[in-house]
Amino acid sequence: MESNVVIVGGGAAGLLAAASSSARLREAGSPARVILLEAAREPGRKILVSGGGHCNVLPAREARARFVSSSPRRLVDRFLDRSPLAAQRAFFEELLGGALREEPEAAKLYPPTNRARDVRDALVAHARGAGVEVRPSMPVREVSLREGGGFDVRLDGDALVASHVVLATGGRSVLAGGADAAGFDWAASLGHTIRTLCPALVPLTGASPAHAALSGVSLEATVTAASGGEEARTRGGFLFTHKGWSGPAVLDVSHVVSRALAEGRPFVVTVSFGGSADEWDAALRSGAGSVLGVLRRSLPDRVSALVLAEAGVAGAEPLHRLTREARREVVRALTALPLPVDGTDGYRTAEVTAGGVALEEVDPGSGASRRVPGLFLAGEILDVTGPIGGFNFQWAWATGRTAGEGAARVLLAER
């Protein structure tokens, strides 16, 4: 059997896995080949469209508690420990030839040129420079075990024999031409547990004429989604759309809704505008004027009207005539307004896929499958989802490098 490493998937994790694996093999003087198979006409298509074409390469600060997984959090930390954020930042600054541009308020890092294409091109050049055979327009149809060890990687009308395979096939969102996210199915057929798959970082939908009438209105808000023992809360941009709700605060909690829908569980989503309940209560107790006048100081007129309609209170009601019960209803609507969510926008607009291979079944030190010798896994195929802000790239870079180096180490040890 030919000794080589085949990387299936040429996205963020796959590109770094390929480059890291080939570099390690070259350093050891190994003749083994590293082959990167990508279904689309060019690798890194998701990198190109990320951040509106600017590519939020990394978060500016660690925030590991914000990663979501059905596996224990200590396992998420162990994977990330292999490639700390500071080391990743140093790598990209050297790769891109300059300091990453920081967006301080959002704690995001961008390439010096602010161009996603420069990131993608640099990664492809880095992989090729390390000796990787990059093969675009090569959709993989099946990955299966060979009798006696190794893998058959079936292509259209052809097949490769691989001693080691890295599955970096990504998720079901933002699929490039020819890609089908079949890595989840292959991993399952090879004996891995796949945790519930669902769209994440995705807008929420709901048939509410009152909310749809505010389409285009945006503001800062705190959104909370809860289902059973799972809860997520994020403060950030909140946007009313003609189909429901979007913005960073909505996207960051959407996984709770997606998973609840996929598993047939009830859920609740609420939004809080501005201050705390005590602060709003104090504002409504003091001063002159109307209830609407108080709300207008902090909220857009149409949002104020929506809140008052939910509370069942007339905006023209003078503050001195506002009953205690009415005041409570207004405060409740301001701090826990229920969103009539009935679904998500699906994989069509989702930025990532939540769920995937259980972390307990993968060695965090090498990315190696604990179920299948010679198999490695990286990126979105694993059951970890980060929030908006470069966190999903952080996960992809970390696990891609680990899996690539791990495959090379094992191959060298076997020779």
Image (cartoon, grey):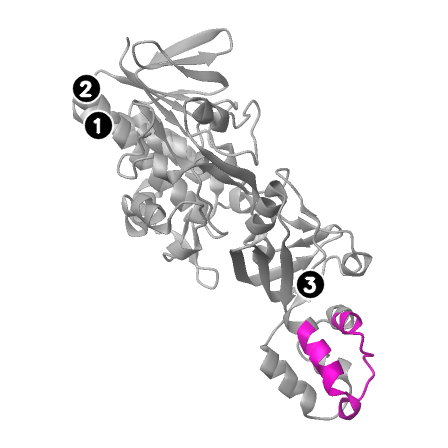
Above or below, 53 relative to 26: below
Residue for badge 2: 414
Residue for badge 1: 409
Looking at the image, can residue 197 be seen? Answer: yes
Give the Cα distance between marks 2 and 1: 9 Å
- Viewer-side residue, 235 vs 230: 230
Within-10-Å neighbours for mark 1: few <14, some 14–19, many 20+: some
Residue for badge 3: 338
Mark 1 or mark 3: name the one nearer the start of the chain. Answer: 3
Total marks in image:
3
Give the Cα distance between marks 1 and 3: 52 Å
Identify which amino acid the numbered label 2 is placed on: Glu
- Viewer-side residue, 278 vs 2: 278
Instruction: Name the quadrant of the N terminus.
Output: top left
Q: Nearer the viewer, mark 2 or mark 1?
A: 2
Q: Where is residue 137 in the image (x, y as percent from the top left)?
A: 50, 19
Identify which amino acid the numbered label 1 is placed on: Arg
Identify which amino acid the numbered label 3 is placed on: Pro
Q: Where is residue 21 in the image (x, y as percent from the top left)?
A: 28, 28
> Taken as a whole, is the magenta stretch helix, strand or loop?
helix
The residue tagged with tag 3: helix, strand or loop?
strand
Q: Is residue 49 magenta?
A: no
Q: Position of residue 54 (x, y in %)?
A: 50, 46
Above or below, 345 relative to 213: above
Within-10-Å neighbours for mark 2: few <14, some 14–19, many 20+: few
- Viewer-side residue, 143 vs 397: 143
Write down the region rendered in magenta: 307-332
Residue at (53% x, 41% y) in the render: 352
Instruction: Name the quadrant of the C terminus.
Output: top left
Q: Is residue 315 left or right of residue 103?
A: right
Q: Is residue 359 left or right of residue 275?
A: left
